[in-house]
Image (cartoon, grey):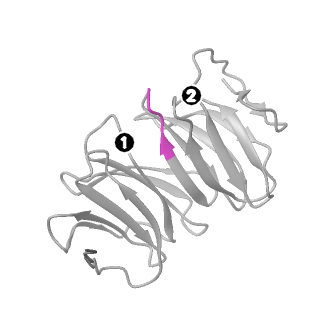
Amino acid sequence: NVTERRLIGHRQEVCGLKWSPDNQYLASGGNDNRLYVWNMQSLSPVQTYTDHLAAVKAIAWSPHHHGLLASGGGTADRCIRFWNTLTGQPMQCVDTGSQVCNLAWSKHSSELVSTHGYSQNQILVWKYPSLTQVAKLTGHSYRVLYLALSPDGEAIVTGAGDETLRFWNVFSKARSQKETRSVLSLYTGIR
């Protein structure tokens, strides 16, 4: 028996979805520049955010701070915005200088990875809540569309429009503070 539930809110294509760590909420981003937070007990959004100036594809819930949601906007926006979904309030915003394609929180620390498209095609690591940029990873020649954390939470893999996958040892125990360039070697250390 298949049950269908329809959540209606976006006025254009839905291009980002992410469940909260406690599985109680679903965040959805759209080409209508809107970010919705849905409580699965109801069919209406519990929060609606309209601050982004471009499509919202990148969405990530913090595993460390209950109710903290990060979202990234497209080329006309370039910002990562942070939201307190418990109160509905916007918290912080950082202009990254380029399209935000994907976001992922570290499993072990309050750090956020962002991947980017036009015009930088790079990966950035941010310390939260200071929003200090702690690493910049370059090597992709086109938009860095996809991002996945390794099961142990120490490495990420990125996939881009340049038809490559690149592995980065971002959250390893041994860190150096320098910027590193990937040469397609597995688990390139970056910090």
SS for tag 2?
loop
Between residues 110 and 187, which one lies in front from this camera angle?
187
Residue closest to the eye, 90 or 44? 44
Q: Looking at this rendering, what residue extends furthest in the right direction?
A: 183
Residue position marked by numbered label 1 in the rendering: 62
Please give left or right for residue 173 compared with residue 4 in the image: right
The amino acid type, in three-letter code, at marker 2 is Glu
Residue 117 lies, with reference to residue 96, above or below; the image says: below
Q: Residue at the location (50% across, 45% down)?
A: 104
Q: Report the residue that reaches farthest toward the bottom.
A: 11
Measured as percent of width and height from the top left, residue 153 is found at 51, 31
In front: label 2 or label 1: 2
Q: Residue at x 71, y 30 (%)?
A: 187
Dividing the picture into quadrants, the one containing residue 118 is bottom right
Q: Position of residue 44 (x, y in %)?
A: 19, 74
Vertically, is 119 above or below 126?
below
Say whether residue 52 is left or right of residue 142. left
10 Å neighbourhood of mark 2: few (<14), some, or many (≥20)? some
Question: Which quadrant holds the N terminus?
Answer: bottom left
In the displayed structure, 169 sits above or below 58; it is above
Question: Which quadrant, please, contains the C terminus?
Answer: top right
Q: State the residue at coordinates (68%, 34%).
A: 168
Nearest the viewer among 121 and 90 is 121
Task: Give the numbered dot on residue 154.
Answer: 2
Whether label 2 touches label 1, CB < 8 Å: no
Up-down: is 15 above or below 83? Answer: below
Q: What stretch is highlighted in magenta?
A: 104-108
